[in-house]
Structure formats: structure tokens, C-alpha cells
Image (cartoon, rainbow, N blue to C red):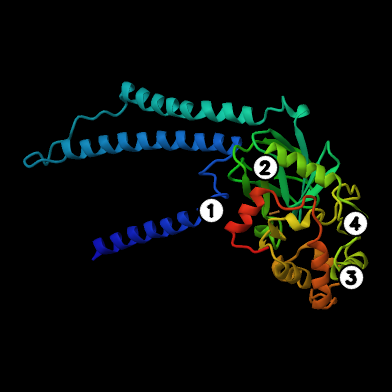
Amino acid sequence: MKDWMGKIRTLSIFSFLVMVLTACGKDNLTALVPKGYGAEQSFNVIIISILVMIVVFIVVMAIYIYVVLKFRRKKGQEDQIPVQTEGNKTLEVVWTVIPILLLIIIAVPTIASTYDLADEGEKEDSINVNVKGMQFWWNFEYANEEVQTSQELYIPVDQKVYLNMLSGDVIHAFWVPSISGKMDVSPENENTMYIQAFEEGVYWGKCTEFCGDSHSLMDFKIVVVSQEEYDQWIDGMKNTDPEYTAQSASAQEGQQLFNNNCISCHAIDASATNPVIAPNLADFDNRTMIAGIEHYSKEALVDWIMNPGEIKPGNGMMDAEYLDDEGMSTISEEDVEKIADFLMELKATDEPVDSVKDFREQEGQGN
Ligand code: CUA
């Protein structure tokens, strides 16, 4: 009976692990398929550590099995006490030195990559982005370009990009598992790191420091593009117009509503330098997602504006005057649709970059 219980327990632990581990299998959200320099360095150290552990496990188990078989009590020797090896200097030295050597094998690449990843030698000649984490979104300011954007950090493939990170409120942490390690984003000290991506694509970022109601929804993306696409995008962003006039009739009415209700917090041009209080909406129509977590569609955008607290509880938009005490929009759904039409006209380039198009397709989104 006991034997069965043990087997069932082992089996259930294994099936639980299989379920948990396979659920982590988002291609663009895993440290196990590194697509950037920092992630690759971490991955290498993980592999070295696991190899060392496997060797230790095999050697220890082999000795264990050998000892159990060889020195087990035999018939007729029940009263014999084996030779005692307590205080054996050679053995003490051997099993002290071996772990030290193993730790050195792990420490050398760990320390080397720690220093390597903190290197700022190329910072001055590289792209610098001031990252600001806020409840529950991210602002990215391209320091040498007078370009500001939110939620989606565009970087050219293979280039080192230096991030200078600060929080606008509480402590957050910046993590894009496929690209790099984690970094705390504090309101007091500026933390810096560089990222370098090897492959074009959209990579999922997460806040990994508990920061409030919607901490787990504080998602962002790194959009890795070709150098050419990057230059075009930066160029487009520089030319986003604060005086933009909506095209369609519905969007024109939407713009009027936006100007009356939203523009005091949300800028529509990337060159805006006013203090960052809410996500910059330049290039909105080329976004991967709505609010960082909802599939990109007009429907999702309307839902978001109608009741943002339902989607991201406790977010900063809850203070907006157009929301009533319950957090519901006092602007009618019909009018919110017009605001959505206006926002979906905002773009820095005619269409999304290839990475974003692919991402939207994979996520099964329309538009
Ligand atoms: Cu920001 Cu958790």
C-alpha cells in the first residue's frame, strides 16, 4: 500500500512539473531560448551549473550504490564492525578540495560575464534610452533623438543599446527573458544595463518586482528590427505632428473628444518633452497590443477606454475626469469609438514593421 502511495506521489509531482514547464513555452518569453547577449550569457552559466550538478549527482550515486552493494552486512558477519575511517586526513582534504574546484568552475564564467555585462565602454557611441517604469506601463526616451515612446522599445538588431532606468513611482524591475537579465528600476538610483539582440522579432517584457494591483500586467515589448527599419522608424517618430488633424469624419470628432478629455496626460507626438504622466500615443496604430496585454483591435481599445480599471486594476488612468466613481466612462460608447478611430490614425510609418506584423499574426489578431 505504502509503495503505491509513493509511486502515485512521484508520478503526480512529475506530471505537475511537465505541465508547469511546458506552459512556460512562449518562444519570445523564455530565458531558455536566448535571443540576446545578456540572455545568452545567463543561459551559458545555467548550462555549466547544470553540467557540474549532473556530474556530482552521477559520481555520488555511483559511489553510493557501490558502497551499499559492496559493504552490506553479510551472513555470518552480523557482529562485525567495519574499519572506521573517521578523521582520515586524505579523505577530508579530498572532499573539501573537490567542491572548491567545482565552485571555481562555476565562478569563473559567472564573474567574467557579470563584468562583461556591466561594461559601459561603448556607451557614448551607442543608442541610449532612458527607461521609466510607472504603475503599470513603461516610457522609453531615446536620449540623442528627441523621441519618446511607450510600451514598445524599438532597437536595431545586433547593436548594443544602453538603458538608463528610473522609476516614476515605486520600485519596478525590467526583464525581457529572451534578451537579457533582470534589472531593478528604482525611483532613486539610476540603474544601467545594455541589451543586444541577435534576431529580429517582438520579445515579451515583464515587470518582475511586485509594484501594485496590476504588477503582473505591467507588460511591454522589445521590437527588434533591421537597421534600415530602425532608421525609418526613428525618422517617422521625429516627424509625428503635435498638430496632426484627423482624416476621417469620425476620427475628427474623436480628436475633438480626445482634446477635451485626454490630451492633458497623453501626447500624440513622439517629440513631446512635457513631463511624462501617461503613455505617449504617437505611432499608436503600429502597436503590438492594447495596454500591453490585449490583442490589438478597435474593440479592445474601446473596451479599454470605457473601463480601464477592469483590464488593469489600479492603473493611473483611474484618476481621469471622464471616468465616474465606478471607473466607467462618462463618454458614451459611440463617442469612445470615435476616439478609437482617431487613435488608430496615429502612425509614424505607413504600416507596422515586419516583426510587429508577424507578432500580430501569431497572436491571432486582426487589423
Ligand atoms: Cu511594476 Cu511590478
Q: Nearer the viewer, residue 115 or 294?
A: 294
Residue 253's label in the rendered image is 3
Q: Secondary structure at mark 2?
A: strand
Query: What residue is shown with label 4?
Result: 244
Three-letter amino acid code at disc 4? Answer: Tyr
Residue 248 is situated, as x and y percent measured from the top left of the image, at 85, 67
Where residue 190 sits, quadrant-wise, is top right
Gap in Å between the C-alphas at discs 3 and 2?
A: 35 Å
Q: Nearer the viewer, residue 220 or 249?
A: 249
- The residue shown at (61%, 53%) is 358
Q: Secondary structure at mark 1?
A: loop
Task: Give the mark nearer the N terminus: 1 vs 2.
Answer: 1
Task: Give the mark nearer the N terminus: 2 vs 4.
Answer: 2
Task: Give the mark nearer the N terminus: 3 vs 2.
Answer: 2
Query: What residue is shown with label 1?
Result: 26
User: Which of the image's four quarters has the C terminus?
Assistant: bottom right
Q: Nearer the viewer, residue 251 or 272?
A: 251
